[in-house]
Amino acid sequence: MGFSISYQRLFRVRVREQGTDNAVRSWVFSPTSACASLLKRYQLVFKSQDDGFDVYYKSYPLASTPIPAKIEDLVQFTFGIRITDPSFMGKYEPDTVEVPQFYLDNLTASGNISAGKNLTAATRLDSADLAYIKQQTFTLKTELPTGNEPSEWRLKEKFGTNAIIQTFPIEVPTASTMPYVYVPINDPVRHPSKYVAKEGPYLLETDKTSPATATVYLNNAAKQSAFNGVLDVYWNSIQSSAPADTGKEYQIVLKPK
């Protein structure tokens, strides 16, 4: 007796233009190495599309256990994003001096999985989605405004209470006239007890109002791959909980300038 194998969509991501709903074909998504391992573990298949991608799950409809590799805990699937159109900056918001880096996800501000379909902070890609993709340990150039120097950098939780995870002192040499200093962030040698090993999004700020709080995504592979953006899709239930036929549908909406 043979086995019947079925592939059904778990979720899909599409990039669309605001106002026209036209497909945007200048973004290429690819699973990180950690994500590829998760896809294999849960018998999922990644399929690239010219305007996004699909992820399918495998099942055996006639078997006593139709889905042998069930998702039962919170899983973080991470995808790198590359912009292939060199004229992208001139076509879409947000306005940036350089090709932007950004972070997208399917979470609410409290860190729960959103029931919505937008993967941006609001209804379209905007400045709130901008981020810095960094190595797990990096050095931060810190400008020193005269008379209002910050005393520390703070690495905080991105979601929930935004609790401070670790602080990094900004040491300014006595009588220094330097306009900036370099501060090591999340160095396992300098900060062994509070080293942040978990890859993912965090908030970075000083104890002053300027510079403004920014999102940083700590991921060695993503930084080394020179991704323009990172997308995290979280899932915490059995694959068959996805809407039949279509799967969970997500979108990234871009506003033309």
Image (tube, helix red, strand yellow):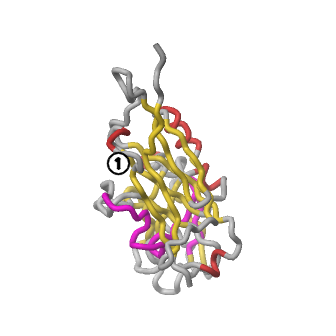
The residue positioned farthest toward the top in the image shown: 1
Q: Is residue 192 left or right of residue 158?
A: right
Q: Is residue 132 magenta?
A: yes
Residue occupying the far front of the picture: 1
Q: Quadrant of the C terminus?
A: bottom right
Residue 151 visible in the picture: no
Examine the rendering and report whether any part of residue 132 can be seen.
yes
In the figure, is residue 249 to the left or right of 241?
Answer: right
Q: Residue 179's x, y, as percent?
A: 61, 81
| Region rendered in magenta | 115-142
Q: Position of residue 36 (x, y in %)?
A: 56, 40
User: Which quarter of the picture shows residue 74?
Assistant: top left
Judged from the image, the secondary structure of the residue bearing numbered disc 1 is loop
Task: Tell me what residue is drawn at x 48 percent, y 70 percent.
Answer: 253
- Magenta part, dominant SS: loop
Relative to the observer, which residue lies in front, 195 or 173? 195
| Closer to the camera in the image, 154 or 230 | 230
The spot of residue 187 in percent (x, y) is: 54, 52
Instruction: In the rendered view, tell whether residue 157 sits above or below residue 10.
Output: below
Look at the image and say whether residue 120 sits in the magenta stretch: yes
Looking at the picture, how far across and down is residue 237, in whole percent?
Answer: 32, 41
Q: Which residue bears the numbered disc 1?
A: 243
In the displayed structure, would residue 118 be above or below residue 32?
A: below
What residue is at 48 percent from the left and 66 percent from the top?
Answer: 252
Q: In the image, what residue occupies the spot 55% across and 44% down?
A: 46
Name which residue type carries label 1.
Pro
Q: Nearer the viewer, residue 199 or 254?
A: 254
Dot 1 surroundings within 10 Å: few (below 14), some, or many (20 or more)?
Answer: some
